[in-house]
Amino acid sequence: MISSFFSPSGALSQILPHFIAREAQVEMAEAVASVIKNKQPLVVEAETGTGKTFAYLAPALLSFDKANASKIIISTGSKALQEQLYIKDLPLLVKATNFSGAVTLLKGRSNYLCNERLNRFMLESKHKDRSLQTELVKIKNWSLSTKTGDIAEIDDLPEDAVIIPAITSNNDNCLGRDCPSFEDCFIVKARKKAMEADLVVINHHLFFADLAVKETGFGELIPEASTYIFDEAHQLPDIASTYFGESLSSRQLLELAKEIDFVYRTELREAKQLSKAAEQLRVATLDFRLAFAIDKGTGSWREKSRERVMQLHAQRLVQVMHFLNEVMVERLGKSEVLDHCFERLNQFTLLFKKLNDVNESGFSYWFDCTRQHFSLNITPLSVADRFQLECQKKQASWVFTSATLSVKGKFSHFTELLGLQDSQCLQLNSPFDYATQTLFVVPRLLPEPGTPGLATKLVEQLAPVIRASKGRCFFLCTSHSMMNQLATGFRQTLTMPVLLQGEKSKQALLDEFVDHGNALLVATGSFWEGVDVRGQALSCVIIDKIPFSSPEEPLLKARIEDAQLKGKDPFFDVQLPQAVITFKQGIGRLIRAEEDKGVLIVCDNRLVTRKYGNLFLNSLPCMPRTRSLDNAISFLKNID
């Protein structure tokens, strides 16, 4: 049935006249259909170009049985893919399969407007700056006509706009049924629609948030399903670690203090002591941040919490929370907002005490400081048992897919992290002809990573390559420091546009990159994956070095600790596999279609000089290789 659906005369070709079936796509679709039928787990690495989205959507939709209420959950790693699935891919497949169920999209709480917080912010914003007032007017006008409340509908509002946290709710400040705007709540409506739907498109964060809510016994965010499909599944272990852990941040404490002060100013003007106690919480929180005595960074909370100065500030913060509790007890029942704040204060107090009891084994205790804020965190060393337990609770089929799950053809790194060792594993190669479409360069005579003046040397050596490419280049960095140094250097050296991550929203930068047609984009982090620039708009991808995460990075540190406890080698069993998967993600930005051509340059001689370099090289497609940048320049000049 599946093979006929993808055949030249099949249902899909009737909807897409230029559709061409690929062997790998049919093989994946048949494997997905089999595990859905037999309620089994499947792990699939489907490299770029295999058509994995249709390969899992088609069998999922064709397996749907309305009579048996066989619901389908599709989870993605990003909002961009979520929207692409829902707006572009699903309508085509629904039509081709004659799917009769209801389909909906559900995002996390922070993506939906909260009318109550918007109204409150408007009351508080009379003295805010003019740009904020302009955004506020735009949002208010949109709020009067929107049916979904999805903030993504607002044109020209950046994803990271400062105003967004002020007009959306979170788990801490949502009043639930006590909210005056509950009947018109967009998130309540979206969740109700999701509970009634037969197929729901969510993201990984929402999947784990649902597990956390169900664990409390006080509700659910998404319905129970018979089929769970995770696209961009390589992100799951990190996200699972975050949700199976616990954290408390200064943002939460300061927000709480602000809410209590708001109650005093708007509802309980006679309760001056409320405002004073809230101010004490604000000051104690800020003092606690200063006690870390660092500008920013992460570290071991186990070690830091033993310092005398931290212990004194922790004791002070606990005393202030107890005092605030006593002040609030006298006013309970006089304000719904205050009652909710009282519950949060008790939760934060218990959690803060738990975070200061750093002796429980099996967990990593760590802190993270930005310039103004801190967070204290507990992360389990391993989430495998916990994740497996959740899978076993549900009588369902599970599909995990991504373009990057294997290391040197083996899936053990991914499957062990999530306890999926008994899963069927399938590896599908890309149909692209990398031998003719690409050239892979590891330049000679470049200094080792970490050498002083490296950025200057990279600008000098690679500027001619970027000129030969006529811009149309991504320079992917492994740190913000290198990214900023390179952007400064290239702006002084090149006449073409040089775009820098962080100066605009991700989508705005991508749109500008394509519109210019000759730009260099210097970026890190989020541009290594989930970015799809097709055609010769992107002809060159340069990577500054092998993307090893810092051993001090909290999640990696927890896994290293876990590996040591199990007698494994942390570098070869944890750091190397993770770096290979990230490396493959970055390389995947270059070739996105059959007609694409381009040059990949990795400025790290360790690929050639260290034994472990082979692990990276053997995980790549079969690209022609060279050490000469002149060969790269010749290839780029002939692309057009």
Image (cartoon, rainbow, N blue to C red):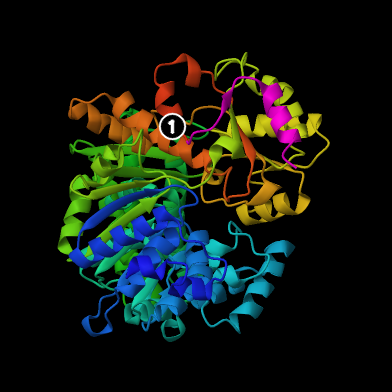
Magenta highlight range:
621-640
Residue occupied by mark 1: 549
Note whether 480 is above or below 60 in the view shown. Answer: above
Residue 638 part of the magenta-drawn span: yes
Answer with left or right where residue 299 lies relative to residue 296: left
- Whether residue 427 is visible: yes
Residue type pointed to by label 1 = Ser
Residue at (43% x, 32% y) in the render: 549
Please state the horizontal and vertical placement of residue 218, each as a whole percent of the image.
24, 72
The C terminus lies in quadrant: top right
> Which residue is at the front of the view, 379 or 195?
195
Q: Residues within 10 Å of mark 1 (few under 14, many from 20)?
A: some
Residue 352 part of the magenta-drawn span: no
Please state the horizontal and vertical placement of residue 61, each as a whole percent of the image.
35, 73
Answer with left or right where residue 207 lies relative to residue 383: right
The N terminus lies in quadrant: bottom left
Please state the horizontal and vertical placement of residue 383, each as a whole percent of the image.
24, 46
Please state the horizontal and vertical placement of residue 404, each as a whole percent of the image.
41, 44
Answer with left or right where residue 244 lies relative to residue 487: left
Answer with left or right where residue 269 lies relative to residue 246: right
